[in-house]
Image (cartoon, rainbow, N blue to C red):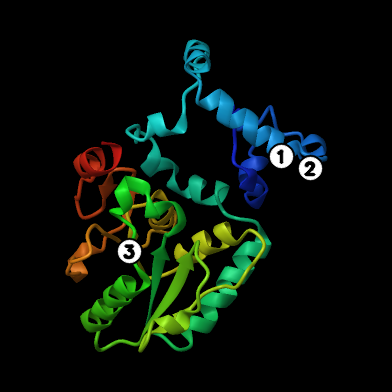
């Protein structure tokens, strides 16, 4: 397999970068880390992947964009273990995540990952999936009621800076500013027992790779139930049989 364009976090996944059957022809560290190399690469990636002429050229050469492969699930089940190995972050990240989870589990029976995506979600789909911190707080309190006989702790993953003190009567943890913070949060989510969050591929990946039951928050008035949580098996499907393709097409793509 040849991957032409990759994310700048590629070095956080050494098993992917050095996988014997995946080749990254544009990966030249001496250039990318020299001067303005990474910014030049990002600019090139954007221009080429958002150009109709290049789309036709890549299609002619047999290339495709990752977004166009979401319905191809033929080999997911049989390659799941290998995928978990390939996409395992580097040791420094996994050690930090494991230490965080070890500390949380000393105080809790169930650890719930809460993905709070702000930033671009203020305008994405007209802000439909942008929930305030207080709205997230109410969902967290709902979960505490669902598992009233258990000690519940929440791991907070967010692209917005705030202290966990805003979530009154909830035992919350989050990382401060860390190197590779996005990947550290993502891996830690995959170690939780449950995950909640807005419609996002970020939490979807954590559920898939870590086999953690996920519940998407689809609207502000949603009443959570235990049955709402299920493991993501592929881009459009959960283990409980929920098919999200129609919801995705109607509420996200359109």
Q: How many marks?
A: 3
Q: Residue drawn 65% across and 41% down?
A: 17
Image quarter (top left, top right, bottom left or bottom right) of the C terminus? top left
> Which tag, 2 or 1, sits closer to the chain's start?
2
Label 2: few (<14), some (14–19) or many (≥20) C-alpha neighbours in 10 Å: few
Name above or below for residue 97 compared with residue 14. Answer: below
Left or right of 5: which side holds 210? Answer: left
**Rounded to the nearest whole Å, what is the CA distance between mark 2 and mark 1?**
6 Å
Q: Nearer the viewer, mark 3 or mark 1?
A: 3
Q: Which residue is mark 3?
A: 131
Give SS at disc 3.
Answer: loop
Q: Which residue is mark 1?
A: 38
| Residue closest to the eye, 130 or 86 | 130
The residue located at (18%, 65%) in the rendering is 222
Please name the residue that numbered disc 2 is placed on: 33
Residue 170: x percent and y percent?
Answer: 37, 85
- The answer to whether the residue labelled 2 contacts the one labelled 1, judged by CB atoms less than 8 Å apart, is yes
**C-alpha gap between disc 3 and disc 1:** 33 Å
Q: Could you tell whether 66 is left or right of 27 in the image? A: left
Q: Is residue 226 above or below residue 172?
A: above
């Amino acid at each position: 397999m040849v991957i032409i364009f990759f994310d700048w976090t590629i070095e956080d996944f050494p098993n992917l970068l050095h996988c014997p059957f995946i080749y990254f022809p544009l990966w030249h560290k001496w250039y990318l880390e020299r001067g303005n190399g990474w910014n030049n690469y990002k600019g090139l990636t954007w221009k080429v992947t958002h150009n109709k002429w290049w789309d036709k050229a890549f299609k002619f050469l047999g290339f495709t964009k990752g977004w166009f492969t979401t319905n191809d699930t033929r080999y997911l089940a049989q390659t799941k273990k290998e995928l978990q190995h390939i996409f395992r972050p580097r040791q420094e990240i996994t050690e930090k995540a494991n230490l965080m989870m070890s500390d949380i589990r000393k105080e809790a029976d169930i650890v719930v990952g809460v993905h709070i995506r702000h930033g671009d979600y203020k305008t994405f789909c007209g802000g439909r999936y942008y929930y305030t911190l207080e709205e997230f707080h109410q969902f967290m309190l709902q979960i505490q009621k669902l598992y009233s006989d258990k000690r519940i702790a929440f791991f907070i993953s967010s692209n917005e800076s705030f202290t966990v003190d805003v979530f009154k009567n909830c035992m919350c943890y989050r990382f401060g500013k860390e190197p590779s913070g996005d990947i550290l949060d993502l891996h830690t989510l995959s170690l939780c027992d449950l995950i909640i969050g807005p419609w996002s591929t970020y939490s979807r990946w954590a559920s898939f790779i870590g086999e953690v039951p996920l519940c998407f928050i689809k609207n502000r008035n949603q009443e959570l139930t235990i049955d709402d949580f299920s493991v993501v098996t592929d881009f459009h499907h959960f283990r409980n049989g929920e098919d999200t393709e129609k919801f995705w097409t109607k509420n996200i793509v359109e």
